[in-house]
Image (spheres, coloured by chain):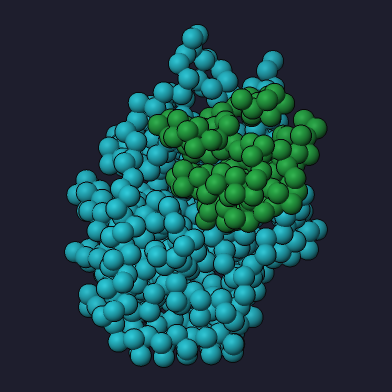
Chain colours: A green, B cyan
């Protein structure tokens, strides 16, 4: 499995994203990290170019719904229907269903133990 | 016997005694509170003369909403402000910029022009209330707006006390609100320090933050080491620019956290004060004792707060307040118990303020200077922390010094490694967290908020954009354009950019326009990702 961990939008908090990158690599996954402040369009382009199976978005600013929507729409527009999108960060419980309804495969809200995230990636992320 | 380690990595013994502080020279290493090297605090009587300043971090939505929250907390005894700006503002984007979509007014208040700053501080006398501005990449223009509002209010310039964070180096390591490459970013830091020292002499034009680097994952000793190294880089830069160290060093301030083990935190600050005093006096030759003083805000620590059983975070906050008081903080600010979920509610903000007030007024934490001084444990720990901090500073030197370590991304990589190590320690239970990895109640419900979630008002962006459009229409456009052209011209030179920025701000140029005028010349930072 190949994963792109991405920081969309303007949020500069990358501790969580970098921890997940290291944990997934230790678990044997191939992981690409975008760095900070990528637009949804840049993330879609990188996901397609790198031919990843999963895009993990890390968002702590509160703008997760519009940003996830734009990434999902972009992937569909590129025909990348099989690329799954997961979201982690400060995601209030009330937004989890909204993200799932957009097509996000899994949401990892604050407080999710790291081993649970790794296990989810090792499974089918359903 | 159970093994215990400090967050800095060294083992903690079950008992300490005289043998652990043998060879200590009380006069040389401790002195008295208010005396060099200030190990025991920077004031003779500490809080008996003046209590720490209480400065909760506030800002959300429009300037008008934020202004109302300022006034609410001031009515409950908060005596100073600490302003949060939204991400577009922190990155120099106007509220109608496509990249600001979804972010306007989210994590702080939106500021597009001087008109917003006027509204944010309406009815707040800037010659009496001290205000810190959590702004870095855009510190120069935002502080210029703040100074302009103070001038409009008729505040005497030597009565204006503001602390723009203006610490761009830590933004490259943690927090990420950089815009320009490292060198022009540093130039702007220096321009603001110089301009403020000469025109608003009681302002604190840089607040060096170990805090955010710790929140990004580094250890206690690294937090202090990186903070001191960054402070040294700024002082060195200002001296090279031709300023006398005593002309600005008395107004250099700091921002650190204290969320860990209480005694280790106290030792960190005692060691940090001693190291800073020696560095500024011996290495930089400062003669004014005020230049030697490590004045710091202590607080925050949101990373220690968890969503599980969120009310427990109130207790964690009380221990942070106690650690900060025992550490000799000049200013305190606490995270709020709902911080793991949401923008703080008014109730959560009030509890945080009350926590600090109870610590000061009821718990006796403000009665005596350096109450832990002389403890075998704390004195031994202070020496151990000092050694560890020096070792971390040496490690930074091996990376080429703090600026090169940041340019190459080596420092960021080290912080990320530490963050991962900490997360593994949480997962294994090596670092205990009540309600998370120990004492977890059987059948406990998954994270249940029971907190009032901030209702983000989607109309904020529209309100902000309408106001921005009106300001652009009503201003003297020729004056604004001329000021922006002058700013671009001067950015190509080497002089201080603050006068041109002030002129642009007063002509109601927008933050986005001011940013662009500089970005066209400076270009943008490319993040080094060492993976």
For this view, does A30 lie left or right of residue B516?
A: right
Above or below residue B14? Residue A69 is: below
Q: Quadrant of residue B177?
A: bottom right
Q: Quadrant of residue B37?
A: bottom right
Residue visible at 54% across and 63% down in the picture: B167
Residue lying farthest top? B442
The answer to whether residue B516 shows anywhere in this view is yes
Residue visible at 67% across and 54% down in the picture: A45
Residue visible at 57% across and 63% down in the picture: B178
Above or below residue B217? Residue B309 is: above
Q: Position of residue B274 (x, y in %)?
A: 59, 55
For this view, does B313 lie left or right of residue A46?
A: left
For this view, does B121 lie left or right of residue B46?
A: left
Q: Position of residue A48 (x, y in %)?
A: 70, 49
The answer to whether residue B431 shows anywhere in this view is no
Q: Position of residue B511 (x, y in %)?
A: 42, 72
Of B110 and B347, the residue lying toward us: B110
- Quadrant containing the N terminus of chain B is top right
Residue visible at 50% across and 8% down in the picture: B442
Of A86 and B119, the residue lying toward us: A86
For this view, does A67 lie left or right of residue B357?
A: right
């Amino acid at each position: 499995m190949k994963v792109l961990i991405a920081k969309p939008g303007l949020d500069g908090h990358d501790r969580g994203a970098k921890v997940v990158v290291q944990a997934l690599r230790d678990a044997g996954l191939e992981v690409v990290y975008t760095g900070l402040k990528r637009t949804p369009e840049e993330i879609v382009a990188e996901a397609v170019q790198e031919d990843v199976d999963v895009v993990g978005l890390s968002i702590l600013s509160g703008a997760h719904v519009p940003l996830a929507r734009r990434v999902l729409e972009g992937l569909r527009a590129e025909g990348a229907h099989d690329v799954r999108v997961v979201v982690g960060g400060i995601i209030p419980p009330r937004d989890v269903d909204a993200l799932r309804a957009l097509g996000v495969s899994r949401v990892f809200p604050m407080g999710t133990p790291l081993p649970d995230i790794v296990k989810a990636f090792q499974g089918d992320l359903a | 016997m159970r093994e215990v380690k400090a967050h800095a990595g060294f083992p903690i013994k079950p008992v300490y005694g005289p043998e652990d502080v043998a060879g200590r020279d009380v006069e040389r290493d401790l002195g008295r509170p208010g005396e060099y090297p200030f190990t025991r605090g920077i004031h003779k009587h500490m809080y008996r003369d003046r209590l720490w300043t209480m400065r909760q971090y506030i800002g959300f939505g429009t300037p008008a909403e934020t202004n109302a929250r300022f006034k609410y907390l001031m009515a409950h005894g908060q005596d100073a402000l600490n302003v949060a700006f939204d991400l577009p503002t922190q990155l120099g984007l106007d509220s109608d910029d496509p990249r600001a979509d979804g972010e306007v007014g989210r994590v702080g208040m939106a500021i597009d022009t001087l008109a917003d700053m006027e509204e944010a501080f309406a009815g707040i006398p800037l010659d009496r209330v001290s205000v810190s501005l959590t702004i870095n990449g855009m510190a120069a223009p935002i502080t210029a707006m703040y100074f302009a509002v103070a001038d409009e209010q008729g505040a005497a310039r030597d009565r204006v006390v503001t602390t723009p964070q203006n610490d761009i180096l830590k933004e490259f390591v943690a927090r990420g609100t950089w815009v320009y490459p490292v060198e022009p970013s540093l130039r702007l830091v220096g321009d603001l320090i110089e301009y403020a020292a000469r025109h608003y002499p009681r302002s604190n034009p840089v607040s060096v933050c170990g805090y955010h680097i710790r929140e990004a994952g580094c250890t206690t000793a690294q937090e202090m080491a990186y903070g001191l190294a960054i402070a040294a880089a700024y002082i060195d830069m200002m001296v090279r620019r031709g300023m006398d160290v005593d002309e600005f060093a008395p107004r250099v301030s700091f921002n650190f956290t204290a969320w860990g083990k209480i005694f280790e935190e106290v030792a960190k600050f005692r060691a940090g004060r001693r190291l800073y005093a020696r560095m500024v006096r011996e290495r930089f030759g400062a003669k004014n004792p005020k230049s030697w003083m490590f004045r710091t805000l202590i607080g925050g620590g949101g990373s220690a707060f968890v969503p599980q059983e969120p009310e427990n975070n109130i207790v964690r906050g009380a221990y942070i307040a106690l650690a900060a008081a025992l550490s000799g903080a000049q200013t305190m600010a606490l995270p709020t118990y709902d911080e793991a979920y949401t923008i703080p509610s008014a109730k959560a903000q009030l509890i945080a303020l009350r926590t600090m007030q109870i610590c000061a007024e009821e718990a006796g934490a403000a009665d005596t200077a350096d109450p832990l001084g002389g403890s075998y444990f704390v004195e031994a720990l202070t020496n151990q922390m000092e050694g560890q901090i020096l070792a971390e500073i040496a490690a930074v030197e091996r990376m080429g010094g703090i600026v090169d370590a940041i340019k190459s991304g080596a420092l960021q990589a080290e912080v990320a490694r530490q963050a991962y190590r900490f997360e593994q320690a949480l997962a294994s239970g090596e670092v205990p967290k009540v309600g998370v990895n120990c004492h977890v109640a059987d059948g406990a419900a998954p994270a249940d908020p029971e907190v009032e979630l901030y209702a983000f008002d989607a109309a904020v962006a529209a309100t902000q954009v309408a106001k921005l459009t009106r300001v652009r229409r009503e201003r003297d456009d020729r004056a604004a354009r001329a000021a922006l052209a002058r700013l671009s011209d001067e950015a190509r030179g080497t002089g201080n950019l603050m006068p041109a920025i002030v002129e642009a701000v007063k002509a109601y140029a927008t933050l986005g326009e001011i940013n662009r005028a500089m970005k066209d010349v400076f270009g943008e930072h490319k993040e080094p990702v060492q993976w």
